[in-house]
Image (cartoon, helix red, strand yellow):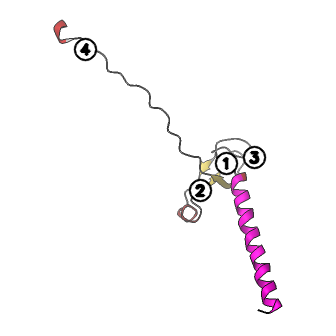
Amino acid sequence: MTEGVLFAIVFVGFFVLRGIFATIVFYFILPDSDRCPMCDAPTLHIHSPVWRRTLPGLRPSWCPDCRWEGMLRRPEATTAAAPAVTRPSSGSPAQH
């Protein structure tokens, strides 16, 4: 290989690696809640099938209070404990 081709491969490789590293860092900087990063108000989810297929871990959001719009991480699904439901006792058969 010539020196020019070798330099181009290394230069392009560093450029691509820098882009991948920056994307990973910025992904973890994004908040993972539905609150606006500017004013802490609840944001509205903007449905976009293109973003959903392209970046499944992110969701486009819009804040109606401060008009901020951008990407937020999808919050992890939490499984809240269901409240215990009890049936009212109808008494024992001997009481009827």
Q: Which residues are magenta?
A: 1-28
Front tag of 2 and 1: 2
Dot 4 alpha-carbon crowd within 10 angstroms: few under 14, some 14 to 19, many 20 or more? few
Residue on which disc 3 sits = 38
Furthest-front residue in view?
1
Residue 60 visible (yes or no): yes
Q: Which residue is mark 4?
A: 90
Kind of residue at disc 4: Ser
The local crowd at label 3, few if under 14, some if 14 to 19, many if 20 or more residues have their Cα within 10 Å, is few
Q: Which quarter of the rendering shows the N terminus?
A: bottom right
> Residue 39 has which mark?
none
Q: Give the amino acid type for the residue marked by disc 3 in the picture.
A: Met
Above or below — where is 17 with respect to 24? below
Vertical arrangement, residue 37 with respect to residue 48, above or below = above
Magenta region, mostly helix, strand or loop?
A: helix
Sequence-first tag of 4 and 2: 2
Circles 1 and 4: CB atoms closer than 8 Å? no
> In the structure shown, which secondary structural element does the residue marked by tag 1 occupy?
loop
Estimate the x, y position of residue 62 in percent, counting from the top left: 65, 52
Q: Mark 2: which amino acid?
A: Gly
Amino acid type at image mark 1: Cys
Horizontal side, residue 88 vs residue 38: left or right = left
Q: Earlier in the sequence, mark 3 or mark 1?
A: 3
Q: Is residue 85 left or right of residue 5?
A: left
Left or right side of 87 for 76: right
SS of the residue at dot 4?
loop
Residue at the image point whose x is 58% and y is 65% from the top = 54
Dot 3 or dot 2, earlier in sequence: 3
Q: CB of mark 3 within 8 Å of CB of mark 1?
A: yes
Name the residue carrying label 1.
63
